[in-house]
Amino acid sequence: MRNVFRRSWSCDEKLEGKVVVITGANTGIGKETAIDLAKRGAEKVIIACRDMEKANAAVKDIIESSGNEHVVCMKLDLSDSKSIREFAEAINKDEPKLNILINNAGVMVCPFGKTADGFEMQIGVNHLGHFLLTYLLLDLIKKSAPARIINVSSMAHSWGSINLEDLNSEKHYNKNKAYAQSKLANVLFTRSLAKRLEGTGVTTYSLHPGVVQTELIRHLNGVQQFFMKMVSPFTKNSVQGAQTTIYCAVDPSLEKESGGYYSDCAPANCSAAAKDDNVAEKLWELSCSLLSLTWD
């Protein structure tokens, strides 16, 4: 039943000589993505995780499942800019190249909380953390072209809007709206980044992985959890949920595409708000301001 109405996709593209970074890959679709890319013979797969105990266990699983020994984990807490800067500094120092960056980690409909830098947790981790990480790794990625940057968004972006006056939901917090805003920010960031990277050989992609039964749903309320159980025959497991990320990372047909949004291993329609280049630019400027960056 899980395969109803789904386009199947397969591709035997190899990744010899490619270095990959995946955030939040100790569980769920991130871990399955790491297994797949390691199986494709990636020169190195780096999983960037907050919980190093879980990350070390995941590395063992990924190596065992893929047969590729070149899998390592590194500490990265996307809710803390100090941790992001330390991680990026280590990558830039130790890695001669970075061909695929997958911004996969995320938090979903959690209670109100703040990051170490004072940002609302969902916009802070899902958007601003990955925005800063990408900025810090971009020179290395450009040097490694052809290269790809993949931002895992969600169809929830279509219920969101960007509140430029209160991006951190300090005046009013609705956990569903804050999540949708952060996922819309992922799509807008992908578009804006694609424009800035034209002609560099670095391409960008955002995607909806599908409704996936992963640990992310732990903050759903009782009614939402009941609904998830009801629709579970139509949801995806982690392997199925990882397929669109893998498609964006490896499919040769996407080599010249950039800035697009994908679902079920195919181009997909995003919301009108996700195509608003005016808001995208304002969000870019605000993100730079909040993070004290100059990124034209």
Image: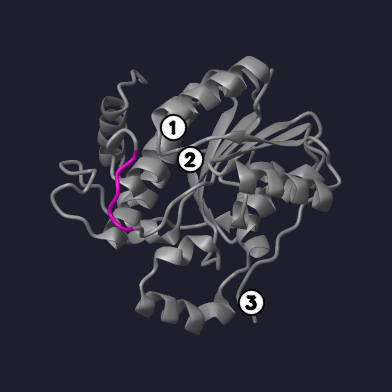
Q: Where residue 148 appears, x then y in whole percent?
A: 60, 34
In the image, residue 145 above or below residue 189:
above
Q: Is residue 213 magenta?
A: no
Label 2, on which residue? 259
Dot 1 and dot 2 residues touching (CB under 8 Å) = yes
Q: Is residue 13 left or right of residue 120?
A: right
Q: Residue lying farthest front?
A: 53
Decide which of tag 3 and tag 1 comes sooner along the chain. 3
Residue bearing the label numbered 3: 2
Identify which amino acid the numbered label 2 is placed on.
Gly
Residue drawn at x 47%, y 29% as measured from the top left: 84
Q: Quadrant of the N terminus?
A: bottom right
Q: Position of residue 120 (x, y in %)?
A: 28, 45
Q: Amino acid at mark 3?
A: Arg
Instruction: Classify 10 Å Cα crowding around label 3: few (below 14), some (14-19), many (20 and above).
Output: few
Question: How many other residues sit within 10 Å of disc 2, few (<14), some (14-19) or many (≥20)?
Answer: many
The part of the chain drawn in magenta is 111-115
Residue under circle 1? 193
Amino acid type, residue under disc 1 in the picture: Leu
Q: CA distance from mark 1 to mark 2?
A: 7 Å
